[in-house]
Amino acid sequence: MDRIAAAVILMAIITYLPRVAPMILVKGRLKSRFLQSFLYYVPYAALGAMTFPAILRSTGNAVSAMVGTIIALVLAYLERGLLEVAIGAIAVVYLVQCLM
């Protein structure tokens, strides 16, 4: 039981430090425009890195997954709504799966 409690405490400290360290180390507003823009895009990059591999494995067929992804990216680039992008990608994946 002592090892489990120690492991939980250690994991809590390790996950808490990256959240608190920037507040402790950086006093005031960041002056570097590069650092501000870098930190602005980090959540999007992390989300993309976690999501993209799952997208490619979601259909069981890499070809239909890639075609659906490309269609979704094109529709998003054309500033369609989220529902249109999702339905368009799903429809294209379904059609590709039927043709294969």
Image (cartoon, helix red, strand yellow):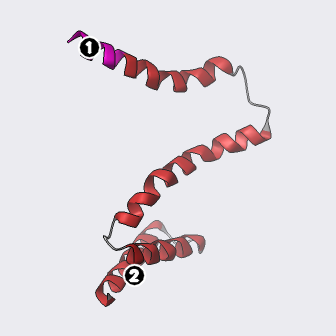
Location of residue 62 in the rendering, given as x and y in whole percent from the top left corner? 39, 73
Location of residue 46 in the rendering, given as x and y in whole percent from the top left corner? 52, 47
Q: Is residue 34 above or below residue 11?
A: below
For the N terminus, which image quadrant? top left
Location of residue 77 in the rendering, given as x and y in whole percent from the top left corner? 59, 71
Residue for badge 1: 3
Give the residue type that dot 2 points to. Answer: Val
Depth-wise, is mark 2 or mark 1 nearer the camera?
A: 1
Q: Is residue 58 above or below residue 39?
A: below
* Residue that appears at 55% across and 45% down: 43
Magenta range: 1-9
* Residue that appears at 34% across and 85% down: 95
Q: Is residue 18 left or right of residue 96?
A: right
Circle nearer the N terminus (2, 1): 1
For the C terminus, which image quadrant? bottom left
Location of residue 40 in the rendering, given as x and y in whole percent from the top left corner? 64, 44
* Residue that appears at 39% across and 81% down: 92
Residue for badge 2: 92
Q: Residues within 10 Å of mark 1 (few under 14, many from 20)?
A: few
Distance of mark 2 from mark 1, alpha carbons?
51 Å
